Image (cartoon, rainbow, N blue to C red):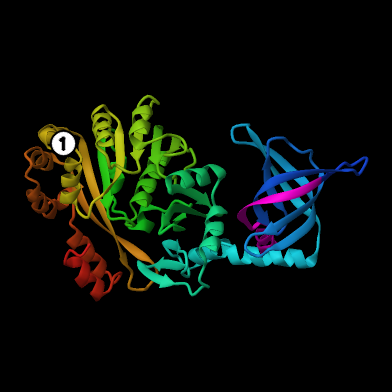
Amino acid sequence: MAKNRSSDRREKRRIYYAIPLTCGIIDPQTKTVTNKTYLARNISSSGLYFENNEPLNLQTELNCKFTLPKSNITINCVIKVERVALIDDGKAFGIGTTYLAISEKDKETIKQLIDRCDVNGLLETTIKRSASDLHLLANQPAVLRVNGELENLGTEIFNPDDISKMIYSLMSKQQIETFEKQKDVDFGFQYNNENRFRINVHQQKGFVEATLRLINSKAASFEELNIPEVVKSLARQKDGLVLITGPTGSGKSTTIDTMVELINQERKAVIITLERPIEYMHINKECIIKQREIGTDTKSFSEALKSSLRQDPNVVVIGELDDAETAKTALIAAEAGYLVIASFHAPDTIQAIDRFMNIFPSENKKQILIQFSHCLRGIVTQLLLPRSDKKGRILATEILIANDAVKRIIRNDELTQLNNIIQTGASYKMRTFAESIKQLFEQGIIDGESYEWYSKGNY
C-alpha cells in the first residue's frame, strides 16, 4: 500500500506553467481535427490542465503541441479530457486531461522538469525533520528552521524561475492574482491529512520567494504542549478578553487552537475565528465553529470582527490584534458579554499591555485603560525554548490573571508594579518567565546554556 500511495503522489505532482498549447480537437465520428489554442496552467507527469471560456466534452481527444520555456524543447502528445469544472465564479472552465499518447523521451523530459521544480519532496523533508519553517529562496538552496536554528538543506541552488514554479504550484488562481497585484499573499495549504502549511509568498529584490510554516493538523492536548492548566480556566471564561502574546514563532496560534478545541469539547457555543490564513481546521463537536480567512472570506480583521458580532457568537478569536479599529471593537465585544481570545505580538506581559495602549491615540489612553482593566481576564506570554534532547522545542510561559489588584494597577497606569504581582501571585496560578524557565531547567528539559541565556531576559 505504501508503495502505491508513493506512486500515486508522484503521478499527482504538478508544476505551474502558463504556456500556450496548440491543440487539434479530434471529432470522434469523422476524425476531423479542429485547431484551437489554449493556455496551460500546470503540467504533471500524467497530463495537462488548462482553462477555456467554453467546456469540452468528457473523453474528447486532442492532438497537442507545446514548447517548454527556456529549453526550446517541443512536446507532442495526444491528451484526453477527464474532468471539466466551472471556475472563476462560472466565467470559465478548468479542463483536466491525461496523456493518451506521448513518447518516452518527451515523458522523461517532463519528468525531469517536474523533479527539478517539485516542492513535494521539500515539504516531506520539512515534516520528517520536524522543522518549523521552510524557506524557498531565489539563487540559494532551500533552508529549514529546526529547533529554532537555520539549517541549509544542501539542495541544488534554485534559479528564480524554478522557485516561481515551485511556489505557484501550491497556489490557486485567485492567490496567484492577489500576489501578482499586491506582491505579498498569505494562505493555508493542506498537504495531507495530518500536516498543513501556513505560507507567505513575497517578493524580494524582484524575485518570488516564500516561507512555509509547518502546522500539525491534529490538535494536541494542553499537556502535550506544556500549556499550564490555568489556561484552561481562561478558555472556560464566559466573557472578557484573553491575550495570547509572544514573539513571532512562539506558538501563539497553536495555543489558541488548543483553547478553541477545549471549548469545542466542553460546551455548546458559537465560535467565530478570524485568521490569516486558517491554520488548524476545526471540526464541529459541541460547538458551531465558523473559520473566516482574511483576504478570502472577508477583507480585514476590523471588518470581519464587526460582522462577526452580528452572527450570534459566544466566542470570537482574532488571529492578529494589530490596529486601533480591531482593538477597539475587541474591547467593545469583551465588555458586551463575548469571550474574545486574541493573538498579540509582545515579548512579555508589561510590554503587551503597553503596546496595546499605544495602538490608540494618546488622548484616549485613560479611557482605554479603564475599559481594558474591566474586561481583561488574563494574559499568556509565550516562548519556545530548544529542548536538551534536541527533539524540538518546549513552551515556557508567563501568566497574568486579572484579579482585583491587577485591574487596579492597569486602571491607574502603574504597569511596573505588575512584575511584583505576578511573582507573588502563585495562589492565582500566575508565574513569571523566570520561574517557568527555571522549572524547565530543573526538570532537565532545557540545558544549562539555554537556562543561562533565557533567564537573563534574552527573549
Residue 242: x %, y % from top left: 26, 41
Q: Is residue 427 left or right of residue 230?
A: left
Is 74 positioned to the left or the right of 342 in the image?
right
Task: Tell which of 134 and 449 is nearer to you.
Answer: 134
Residue bearing the label numbered 1: 361
Q: Residue furthest right?
A: 30
Q: Image quadrant for the C terminus?
A: bottom left
> Which part of the image, by quadrant, shows the N terminus?
bottom right
Identify the residue at horizontal 50%, vertical 63% (top origin).
127
User: Which of 268 and 457 lies nearest the eye of the viewer?
Assistant: 457
Report the magenta residues as a range: 1-24
Q: Position of residue 387 (x, y in %)?
A: 33, 69
Residue at the spot 75% in from the left edge and 60% down from the top edge:
75
Q: Is residue 337 magenta?
A: no
**Residue 189 location, x and y as percent?**
51, 50
Q: Secondary structure at mark 1?
A: loop
The type of residue carrying mark 1 is Pro
Q: Left or right of 71: which side holds 177?
A: left
Q: Quadrant of residue 384?
A: bottom left
Residue drawn at x 12%, y 43% as measured from the top left: 406
| Residue 297 shows up from this direction | yes
Q: Is residue 267 visible?
A: no
Q: x and y percent of residue 181 in the render?
A: 46, 44
Q: Is residue 9 magenta?
A: yes
